Image: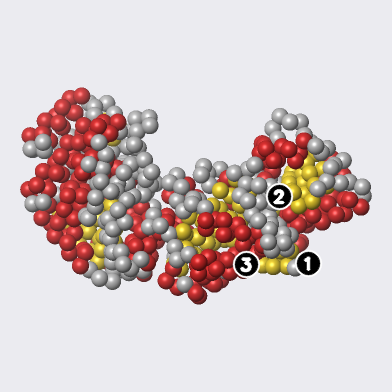
Amino acid sequence: MTIPQLEKKAKEIRLTIVKMVGPGKQGHFGGSCSIADVVAALYFYKMRHDPKNPKWPDRDRLIFSKGHAAIAQYAALGMCGYFPEKELWNLKELGSMLQGHPYLHKTPGIEANTGSLGQGLSMSCGIAAGLKIDKNRAPRVYCIVGDGELAEGQIWEAAMSASFYKLDNLTTILDYNKLQATGRIDERLNTNPVREKWEAFGWHTIEINGHDMNEIVESLDSAEKVKGKPSIIIAHTIKGKGIPFAENNAAFHNGVMTQEQYETALKILSEQGAM
Amino acid sequence: MRMQNQRRVYGETLVELGRENKNIVVLDADLSKSTMSCLFEQEFPERFFEMGIAEANMISFAVGLSLTGKIAFANSFAVFSTGRPFDQIRQGVAIGKMNVKIIGSSAGLSDFGDGATHQSVEDIAIMRAIPNMTVISPCDAIETKKVVRFAAEYNGPVYIRVSRNDVPDIFPEDARFVIGKPVVLREGKDITVFATGTMVYEALIAADRLSGLGISVRVVNVSTLKPLDEESIIRLSEDVKGIITVEEHSIIGGLASAVTYALRGKGIPIKTIGINDEFGQSANTYDELLVHYGLTADNIIENAKALY
Ligand SMILES: Cc1ncc(C[n+]2csc(CCOP(=O)(O)OP(=O)(O)O)c2C)c(N)n1
């Protein structure tokens, strides 16, 4: 897929997010929209995967350690055809295959149960290590973490184990949107500086604009070439990106759109040529 | 009477399993020389993961390994393997029914010298409360071997409690382990003693001595604490004057809770022997602690007399 095509996919993901949640209902818009471009690049450019065969052993894996942003992944999975599009509109309904947080056994294409922050990176390390034991198989593992999530001590336990076990089949993407649930990370609990920390923990680091598709694609390609250590792409992003009233607004971390806001969001995202 | 060390047999069984099945992987958090997972490390270094003193990461990492088809055994002391990573077990292992086995080593008071911080009185309670979790407390080294084999074959989360010390053999080598089945080790018609883990042996001694006093005691080994075979518990309780539960664990949330719940509304007299909602402490010997907390044949005898 070309860069403009990928950009279009990202917009489509955002539009789908808005439609899935709808007006009057709570949804994690902020952290889902900030990572939408990266998610588009992963599903429509980088990852080897087969929506018709979600358990294909050689597939690359994507784990949302920041599981609350699952709607971005659901949108992409739906667009890829992992399940019928109509499932998207049952989000979080009783009996729905699309749970509030990623649920392995209910949703095709979901790789791990996450939602309790700080655990998905460890799981991703375990998956990467497991795949390395079977040396004939070399799929890549992608893991998305949040900058607020970095306050969890377990993240750093995982970081140590990944470099110790030389998990060079693991690429982590930090959704560096500078906001957590209740405000700015540097005012709530500062997890900065991030790059220095990851380097100190033995990781290869790449810093990009997480909304620039060229930079996303290049960083994903270059991370794959690093040998002997795990990589982290520090993607500078804007929380709520693409929905003006949600942008940089911690209140829209898990926000509720009014009918008016919903229509505004639909209009803006559609005008951007998402569909 | 042959004494064997439960954790050594555990470690040896892991090695046997490792030879038979290349999907067995083992993790430890810097206690491999105590949990005896070091035996597996020696033979299969490429399938052993030293996770450092980081139990949370160990459990979630094990979940990741299981997601690639591995059968992961995660080891530490029972206090650390169930307490520190409770959330990782709940969210990561149990909700998704991952093929992860959690080993609670040096369980109960068996790490007698190290005191309250290292003695697990609530590990069974914590694990029993989690949906999808199977909880087993084998009574001797022979049963331990069978339980570990069961865990490797069973596809899902299992918690296994392992004592630190030598324990007498109770089962013959060829005994079968059937998940969920309480085993009547000795028949009796007056009192039934339900015991788990290290307390099974104390129950057998008590039964022997009580028979000399004319009290006939049935001894039942309840190694599977969850799922609990309520029907058998009821059947083995209804034909006696009263029952006693014995465990090296708090009376809250363990065998006492499980059995009394199974017998709810039946009006059967019940005595519960266990640790009475308090922490352990250091002692020079294990036996000293067992006496202090009433986890002895003597105490079982006193309770049986009271029921008789
Ligand atoms: C262990 C845990 N604690 C708290 C929460 C509640 N929670 C969900 S999202 C969130 C903030 C996450 O911030 P960040 O990682 O920066 O994600 P983003 O801002 O990108 O959405 C919190 C506190 C949780 N899901 N897990």
Foreground: disc 2 or disc 3: 2
Q: Which residue is mark 3?
A: B9
Residue farthest toward the right in the current orientation of the protein: B213
Foreground: disc 2 or disc 1: 2
Q: Are marks 2 and 3 on the same chain?
A: yes
Secondary structure at badge 3 equals helix
Q: Nearer the viewer, residue B266 or B123?
A: B266
Q: Position of residue A131 (x, y in %)?
A: 34, 62
Q: Which residue is mark 1?
A: B1
**Quick one: label 1 or label 3, which is nearer the N terminus?**
1
Q: Is residue A25 left or right of residue B34?
A: left
**Quick one: label 2 or label 3, which is nearer the N terminus?**
3
Residue B292: which quarter of the image? bottom right
Q: Nearer the viewer, residue A205 or A182?
A: A205
Q: CA distance from mark 2 to mark 1?
A: 20 Å
Residue B258: which quarter of the image? top right
Q: Are marks 1 and 3 on the same chain?
A: yes
- Quadrant of the rendering where the N terminus of chain B is positioned: bottom right
Q: Residue at 17% across / 64% down in the picture?
A: A222
| Label 2–label 1 contact, CB within 8 A | no
Q: Which residue is mark 2?
A: B183
Q: Are marks 2 and 1 on the same chain?
A: yes
Q: Nearer the viewer, residue A173 or A246?
A: A173
Q: Position of residue A51 (x, y in %)?
A: 24, 46
Residue type marked 1: Met
Residue type marked 3: Val
Secondary structure at badge 2 equals strand
**Quick one: label 2 or label 1, which is nearer the N terminus?**
1
